[in-house]
Image (spheres, helix red, strand yellow):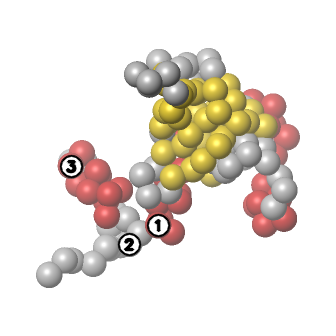
Amino acid sequence: MRKEFSKAWKGSKKPSKQRKYGYNAPLHIKGNFLNAHLSEDLMKKYSIRSLRVRKGDKVTVMRGQFRKKSGKVERVDVKKTEVYVSNVELAKKDGSKAFYPVHPSNLLITELNLDDKKRMKRVKK
């Protein structure tokens, strides 16, 4: 019998428990792990520090082998907590290109996709 996920969990110093919380979290909570910082000008404009990454946003990679590369968000995988960016690709052995998954904490949002009215409200709050 699998124990249910507890929203009342307050936290632990133990990294294994922190990872377990992230892995076993339901999707509506995993969505909160997809936040990325906004660029300085967006921060001043909307007076918020971070926002959930969304398809169509323009982002810059801040960490890893693709640092300083920027592109458009092509896909967001909520289950795996991964973001796929247009210019962040690896060349495969057969010559084709494959998207490289980036963790949202390593991204900086430089331009927002404000097509959605609900997101517009969230930003303007």
Q: Which residue is mark 1?
A: 27
Instruction: Give the amino acid type for the residue marked by disc 1 in the picture.
Output: Leu
Give the quadrant of the N terminus.
bottom left
> Is residue 47 among the parts visible in the rendering?
no
Q: Which mark is residue 7?
A: 2
Q: CA separation, marks 1 and 3? A: 20 Å
Q: Earlier in the sequence, mark 2 or mark 1?
A: 2
Give x and y (percent) for residue 56. 74, 45
Instruction: Give the amino acid type for the residue marked by disc 2 in the picture.
Output: Lys
Q: Which mark is residue 16?
A: 3
Up the image or down, 9 lies above or below 87; here it is below
Give x and y (percent) for residue 107. 58, 33
Give the residue displayed 85% in from the left and 40% down from the top: 45
Eye-nearest disc, 1 or 3: 1
CA neighbours of label 3 inside 10 A, class few (<14), some (14 to 19), many (20+) = few
- Secondary-structure class at tag 2: loop
Instruction: Give the amino acid type for the residue marked by disc 3 in the picture.
Output: Ser
Up the image or down, 13 lies above or below 4; here it is above
Give the residue displayed 31% in from the left and 64% down from the top: 24
Q: Earlier in the sequence, mark 1 or mark 3?
A: 3
Give the residue displayed 35% in from the left and 56% down from the top: 22
Give the residue displayed 51% in from the left and 52% down from the top: 77
- Secondary-structure class at tag 3: helix
Give x and y (percent) for residue 106. 52, 32
